[in-house]
Image: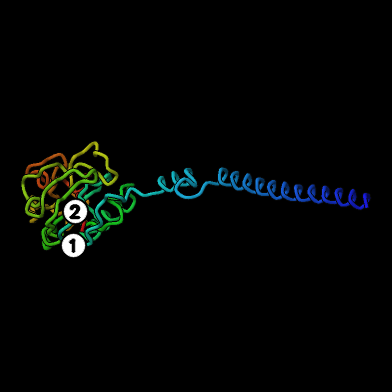
Amino acid sequence: MMLASMFGGCQAFLDLGDDAAKANGTDASSADAEKVHAASSTDAPSGPDASPAADAAASDAKSDDSGVPAPCNKALDCERVVFVTSVLYTGNLAGLAGADATCTQLASGSPLARVRGRNYVAWLSGFTEFVSTRVQHGTGPYVRPDGNRVADGWPGFANPMHAGAIDIDETGKAVAGTTNVWTGSDAYGTPESGTCGEWTSQGAVLGAYGMDTAVDESWSHAGDAVCNGLAHLYCIEE
C-alpha cells in the first residue's frame, strides 16, 4: 500500500515535470517566432518606409515634364514656345517646308520638356506664302524655352514691340556670336523684299533678316543680307 502511494506520488511528479516542459517549449516557440517576426519587420520594412532608396530612385526617374504645360498641337489657348536655333544656316533652307522641318528636328533633341515633343514652324515668309498665314494665331502667352514671356497672344507677338527678346535656343541657352535671323518678314508676318530665292538659294541674292536681341521692329526685319551668309531661324510652336 505504501509502495503504491509512493509510486503514485512519483508518477504525479513526473507528470508535472512533463507539463512544465511542454509549457516551456510552447512559450519558447512563441518567443522565437516573435523574434523572427520582429527581425523580419526590421530587416524588410513595408509601407511608405519600405524602401527609401527605391523612393529616391523613383523620384530621380521622374522627367522634368511636371509643371510644364502640354504641347499646343495647333490649339490656340495654350502656352506657345518660341526659340531661336542654336545652329546657323545659309539662305538655302530647302524652302519653307525644309525650314519648318529643321525647327522640329532641333526641338526633338532638346533636353527641355518645354521644348521637345512639339511641332514647330519657322518664322519665315516667301513671296507667295506669308508667315502670318503659316503659324497659329494663339491667344495664350508666347514664351521662350526658359519660360520668360515674349508676348501675350498673336496681336502681341506679330508686333513691332516684344516684352522679351527671342534669344534663347532650343537647349535653353542664350545664343552667342551673330544675332542675325533669317525671316523674310516684317514684324507683322508679311514678306519683305529678300527671300533667298524662296529659301532655296545661297547665291549672291538677298534675304531679309532680323536680330534675336531686339525687342523693337528689328526683331523681325533689321535689313537684308547676302544668302551665302549665315543666320539663325526663329521657331514657333504649332
Residue at mark 2: 80
Q: What kind of residue is marked 1?
A: Ala
Image coordinates of residue 54 in percent, x first then y, are 48, 47
Real-space CA distance between mark 2 and mark 1, rounded to the nearest whole angstrom: 9 Å
Image coordinates of residue 121 in percent, x first then y, are 21, 57
Quadrant of residue 73 in the image? bottom left
Q: Residue at x 93, y 53 (%)?
A: 1
The residue lying toward the viewer, choosing from 171 and 176, is: 171
The residue lying toward the viewer, choosing from 37 and 179, is: 37
Give the number of the disc on residue 216: none
> Crowding near pointer 1: few (<14 within 10 Å), some, many (20+)?
some
Image coordinates of residue 145 in percent, x first then y, are 24, 46
Q: How many marks?
A: 2
Q: Residue furthest top?
A: 177
Give the number of the disc on residue 75: 1
Quadrant of residue 219 in the image? top left
The secondary structure type at the circle numbered 2 is strand
